[in-house]
Image (cartoon, helix red, strand yellow):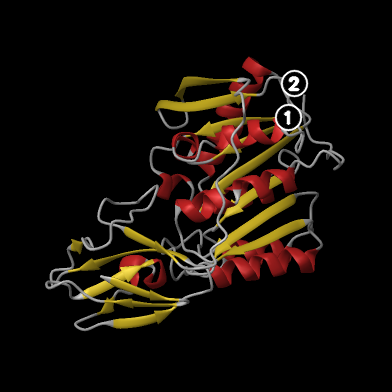
Amino acid sequence: MIKIQDRYVTFIPPKDATYLMGDFTDWDEKPIPIREPITIEFPRGAYIEYAFLDANEQPLADLTNPEKPKHPWYDYHRSFTLPHNHFQTAPRPNIFCGRVSEHTIGSKIFADKRTYYVYEPPVPPAATLYVHDGEAFYQKLRFHHVAAALLEQDAIKPVRMVLVEPKDRQAEYWFNERYEAFLLEEILPSVEHLYGATEERGLWGASLGGLVSAWLAWRNPHMFSKVGSQSGCFTAHPSGGDEYHDPEWLTAQFTETPAELVRFYIETGQVEWLLAPNRRFAAMLTDRGYPHCYQERPSGHNWATWEQGLEPGLVYLFDKSEQPVSLNVP
């Protein structure tokens, strides 16, 4: 059970609960022992997801709370929204135009079959945005519908979306040169053969998807001029593997190399372990002179947070008034 009073939430544990976890504990990274009610202060207007654990650290749903996340990581997750929350529903087009096509290619690099989806706008696109964790951004967040709505409103340039689904995201997104080759040598040529090249290319992703987007643009600024990173997992090191405690290797690489003509949209939740690393990454972009927009939201590492960033991220990266960056487009 929970009791809400403005910014304060009291968690009253069910009978068998031993621990409390949620966005505010990095989930099972730092669960809070709980035998009696605990009151926690959150940012004004916060949206939070949480659950309990029993003595064997097995999850317990809060059956007294009927509010479930719209896109839960697990069925036992529950959520609450504090007063003065300003989350908005992502825009949808009045009439969806354009088309979405599913493609399967045989990857020689990974020796398997891979799926990607292409949203092609109803007018010739000015840019192609490669989206990591494509299945979730396509099915859960309907990212292409947001792009279609903004195009309908004449708020952005027409953007093609290529939504790419990984097989092992932890391995593939962790500074993996095979994944880089897969995207550049297999996915990108396939897309441009079927649909044609565009004047600009960009990358988008959340968590490790945000990390790999920034990494790929750092290594290939001649290929990608736009990056959208949501809760980018900038606590990562090529020789590590601990997304909670690794040093912020990629931020250091940006600091030590010349700035490139890449525009960034960076956002993160205020109730997650990646808040400080994202602040430092954004500060580095400022110091290095990269054009960027940085946003924080009163929430955690979840799809509700990331859904809020779809519209402002697209508008910032693909504003109609911005001059395109010349890329290596055949």
Amino acid tagged 1: Pro
Against 4, is 116 above or below?
Answer: above
Near mark 1 (Cα within 10 A), the count class, few <14, some 14-19 or many ≥20, is: many
Where residue 74 appears, x then y in whole percent? 29, 51
Secondary structure state at the residue bearing disc 1: loop
Q: Tell me which label, 1 or 2, sits earlier in the chain.
A: 2
- Residue at image location 68% in from the left, 53% down from the top: 265
Residue 28 x, y percent position in the rendering:
30, 67
Query: Picture coordinates of residue 15 (x, y %)?
Result: 12, 73
Q: Is there any visible trace of residue 4 in the rendered image?
A: yes
Residue 253 lies, with reference to residue 41, above or below; the image says above
**Residue identifier under label 2:** 124
Residue at (49% x, 27% y) in the render: 116
Instruction: Determine if residue 219 is in view.
Output: no
Nearer-the-camera pick, 162 or 321: 321
Q: Secondary structure at mark 2?
A: loop
Q: Which one is in front, 288 or 88? A: 88
Q: Which residue is mark 1?
A: 158
Q: Amino acid at mark 2?
A: Pro
Q: Residue at x 57, y 44 (%)?
A: 90
Quarter assignment of residue 186: top right
Residue occupying image coordinates x 49% and y 40%? 141
209 with respect to 191 (left or right): left
On the image, which quarter does residue 60 sit in? Answer: bottom left
> Could you classify mark 2 by the number of other residues whose Cα lies within 10 Å: few (under 14), some (14-19), or many (20 or more)?
some
Q: Which mark is residue 210?
A: none
Quarter holding the N terminus?
Answer: bottom left
Q: Residue 300: where, in percent of width, then height?
A: 47, 63
Whether pointer 1 and pointer 2 mark residues with C-beta atoms closer than 8 Å, the reply is yes
